[in-house]
Amino acid sequence: MARYAKKLPQLDGGRFLTYVGMETDLLFTEGVDLPGFATYPFLETEKGRALLKQYIQNLIEVARKFDLGVILESHTWVANRDRGAAIGYTPATLKDRNIQSIEFLVAAREAFGDLPTLISANVGPRADAYAPSEQMSADQAEEYHSEQIGILAKTEADLISGYTMAYPEEAIGMVQAAQKHKVPIVIAFTVETDGSLPTGLSLGDAIEAVDQSTDGYASYFMINCAHPDHFGQILSNAPWMNRLKGIVANASRCSHEELDESEVLDDGHPEELGQQLANIHRMYPNINILGGCCGTDMRHLACIAKSLRTVNVG
């Protein structure tokens, strides 16, 4: 199982910080318009690139201060054919933006990265992650996501990360696409307030379904876009937990539906979030990739990093 884990040796034994909460920070804190929730258009202007660079620099500085590694996520979560077309992007331009995003992170790593740093090519779901009314089969998902994954596989990205997966068939298709293009891949499932996927399936069953269908090809699994209170009760010593390596948490305890309808940002309690994630790492040392999703900013990342420093798992 996990045959590609050997290609990510930097992740063994260390602690890593990552961040995918920039969109909500831009929308609610900075008042920036984000058509389609996409950040890759920022790559098109000098001002936009400077903004993206600042987020990266801030993340790296937090990780450096607390002696952590860092995983840099590309700005390509919704840079797939359907979601790009919805905001006027052609497949040719999307290809350019996917490549440009990885090149941007490579340059940033060279400029700031004097600590363990991996570049993750972020790939999102075809449709709404939180209300997957039209679900693809695994084969359909493989065909669809092969376009973007095939482009990213030819870049200097260290891995593909499929974020906010809501049902296993789409995740299986992503992993099959990564197999075809011979690139490591990580799958991050999102869960609702009861710890189950939006489809009602348990996280453990979803992870086992992906592994069984792909011969354990995924390097590891994560949870993202949920608050620790939503999934704390499902964490256990079950075998599937050995495949769970990361948690990228929301600041808010609200459900996805409540967050979608909210007109104000719920940024939760940064110190509490940091302590909760550190406690999870203390109980389950294999979960060593931690970070912030919706509603988080560098205050939350700093609190997560500071709390992690107090954890002794050796």
Image (tube, rainbow, N blue to C red):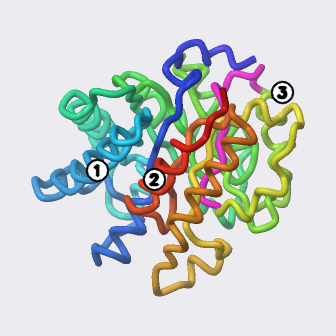
Question: Around disc 1, counting alpha carbons within 10 Å, would you say few (fewer than 14), some (14 to 19), or many (20 or more)?
Answer: some
Image quadrant in which you'd find residue 252: bottom right
Residue extent of the magenta highlight: 214-226
Residue 308 appears in the figure: yes
Discs 3, 2 touching: Cβ within 8 Å: no
Of residues 176 and 120, the one nearer the viewer is: 120
Question: Around disc 2, counting alpha carbons within 10 Å, would you say few (fewer than 14), some (14 to 19), or many (20 or more)?
Answer: many
Q: Label 2 belongs to which residue? A: 20
Q: Residue at x 53, y 37 (%)?
A: 161
Instruction: Measure the C-alpha gap from mark 1 to mark 2.
Output: 13 Å
Q: Image check: 138 left or right of 40?
A: right
Residue 185 vertical position relative to residue 229 in the rendered view, above or below: above
Image quadrant in which you'd find residue 260: bottom right
> Is 219 within the magenta?
yes
Q: Image check: 19 left or right of 99?
A: right
Q: Position of residue 208 (x, y in %)?
A: 84, 35
> Is 54 within the magenta?
no
Q: Label 3 belongs to which residue? A: 212
What amino acid type is highlighted by mark number 1?
A: Asn
Lower position in the chain sequence, tag 1 or tag 2: 2
Q: Label 1 belongs to which residue? A: 58
Residue 24 vertical position relative to residue 265 in the rendered view, above or below: above
Lower position in the chain sequence, tag 3 or tag 2: 2
